[in-house]
Amino acid sequence: ETGVTQTPRHLVMGMTNKKSLKCEQHLGHNAMYWYKQSAKKPLELMFVYSLEERVENNSVPSRFSPECPNSSHLFLHLHTLQPEDSALYLCASSQEENSPLHFGNGTRLTVT
Amino acid sequence: EDKVVQSPLSLVVHEGDTVTLNCSYEVTNFRSLLWYKQEKKAPTFLFMLTSSGIEKKSGRLSSILDKKELFSILNITATQTGDSAVYLCAVALTGANNLFFGTGTRLTVIP
């Protein structure tokens, strides 16, 4: 148990599907993040929320849409994805924007 | 362009060996350097380094930062099979919300 819970653990979707990834943190942190981890590439930041307000959108395509309804929950809505979007999507939280990140176990996404 | 480079990319050692993992960086507005261990899924935090020359230690793991030469090392002594993982280095910048990650070093410890 890492204190950051992600669901589902695995997801297979077609290019025309719409799905959502969910993240919940039980640590009382104020900032939440979405990262993408592809094979043989560094972790890439996608979105940052601080106190439920988006503070960073790292040039992510619009087919990825984040939502942060409160400081404990973060969603990533997916639609019309491409096969190259297949990756491990990691959610993280931190006490504040400059503190170490605590990661969830990730959602392994496969786009067919 | 900001970048973080880790070496070696992979390493295989026997139990009991000592290993040194390297992380070099070229970034503007450096704030801190962090080490994470990723076994299966979630990277877990190991160390955060902000000052040069001050060793951080946790059990058999230790790390040190050299801000003049722009690198950090992570040492693991008396390695165990449970140390097998990918070790990630990341750099945080002042005034930014991002961590720049390296590609990691995959360590395999064989009995």
Image (tube, rainbow, N blue to C red):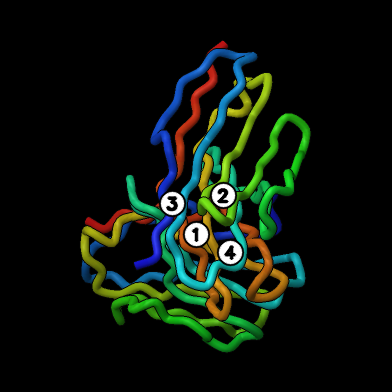
Host chain of mark 4: A
**Disc 2 and disc 1 in contact, CB within 8 angstroms:** yes
As rendered, which of B64 and A111 lies closer to the eye?
Answer: B64
> From the viewer's perspective, is the residue at label 3 or at label 2 nearer?
3
Residue that label 1 marks: A90
**Disc 3 and disc 4 in contact, CB within 8 angstroms:** no
**Residue drawn at (64%, 20%) of the image:** B80
Q: Are marks 1 and 3 on the same chain?
A: no
As rendered, which of B37 and A91 lies closer to the eye?
Answer: B37
Mark 1, residues whose alpha carbon is within 10 Å: few (<14), some, or many (≥20)?
A: many
Residue that label 3 marks: B102
Residue that label 4 marks: A92
**Disc 4 and disc 2 in contact, CB within 8 angstroms:** no
Residue A48, how many percent across, how many down? Answer: 52, 77
The span from disc 4 to disc 2 (Cα, nearest Å) is 9 Å
Under mark 3, the amino acid is: Gly
Mark 3, residues whose alpha carbon is within 10 Å: few (<14), some, or many (≥20)?
A: many
Residue A93, how many percent across, how many down? Answer: 63, 67
**Residue drawn at (34%, 67%) of the image:** B1
Host chain of mark 3: B
The span from disc 1 to disc 3 (Cα, nearest Å) is 16 Å
